Image: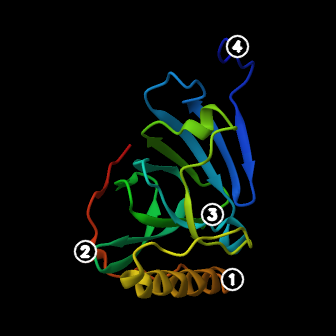
Amino acid sequence: MKFSKEHQEIPVDTWVWGKEMLLWGYDPEHKYTLKILHPKIGREGCMSLQYHREKSETWFVLEGSIWAVFIEGDQVITRVMHKGDFQNLPTGTVHRMMGLTDSVRILESSTPDAHAADKSVEKDVVRLHCVHGRDCEQYEFTEKQHLIDEAIRASEEAIAAVNRGETPSELNLQALTGADHIDF
């Protein structure tokens, strides 16, 4: 069986934080993108603190566990997500995830990701902080820079917890929107 006209197998991108399988969105004509993310554990699998200018996405945990941080309004929120948990991320939401288990798989559905379909197209990622040393930008909303700093501190605390063999703490869950759990 062949995956598509263009691909013998499912396209896989390898990043410093882990891998992503591109199930849909590999063609610029596709109207949405569907990926399976497999982040590594702890600092090694800690993605950039980032946001998207155009892309909105939903994360659904297929297996394993992740830690995530979001900025909603004037709140930094941290959450541990397990199988069946999902999180909607509207355009512009500052976010980051990190694997907590080897087996973690996240289904990410999003508006079209042009870079996924054509690597010559610039990624719609505004990277604000990266534990892997990649280039970052200054947050355009300077009056909210303290929230970015708080999210970075929360990230370092979560990484330290993982290094100690502990589950990172959750923060401000009462302010979280677009989240729930589905048993499957």
User: Which residue is the site of mark 3?
Assistant: 101
User: Which residue is the site of mark 1?
Assistant: 163
For the C terminus, which image quadrant? top left
Q: Residue 2 has which mark?
A: 4
Tell which circle, 4 or 1, labels the residue nearer the N-terminal end.
4
Viewer-side residue, 51 vs 122: 122
- Disc nearest the viewer among 2 and 3: 2
Q: In whole angstroms, how far apart are the C-alphas of marks 2 and 3?
A: 26 Å
Across and down, in percent, residue 142 comes to: 42, 81
Q: Amino acid at mark 3?
A: Thr
Across and down, in percent, residue 64 comes to: 56, 57
Q: Residue 175 has which mark?
A: 2
- Disc nearest the viewer among 4 and 3: 4
Tell which circle, 1 or 3, labels the residue nearer the N-terminal end.
3
Across and down, in percent, residue 25 comes to: 54, 30
User: In the picture, residue 23 is in which quadrant?
Assistant: top right
Is the Cβ of the residue at disc 4 closer than 8 Å to that at disc 2? Answer: no
Q: Is residue 6 above or below residue 66?
A: above
Q: In whole angstroms, how far apart are the C-alphas of marks 4 and 2?
A: 45 Å
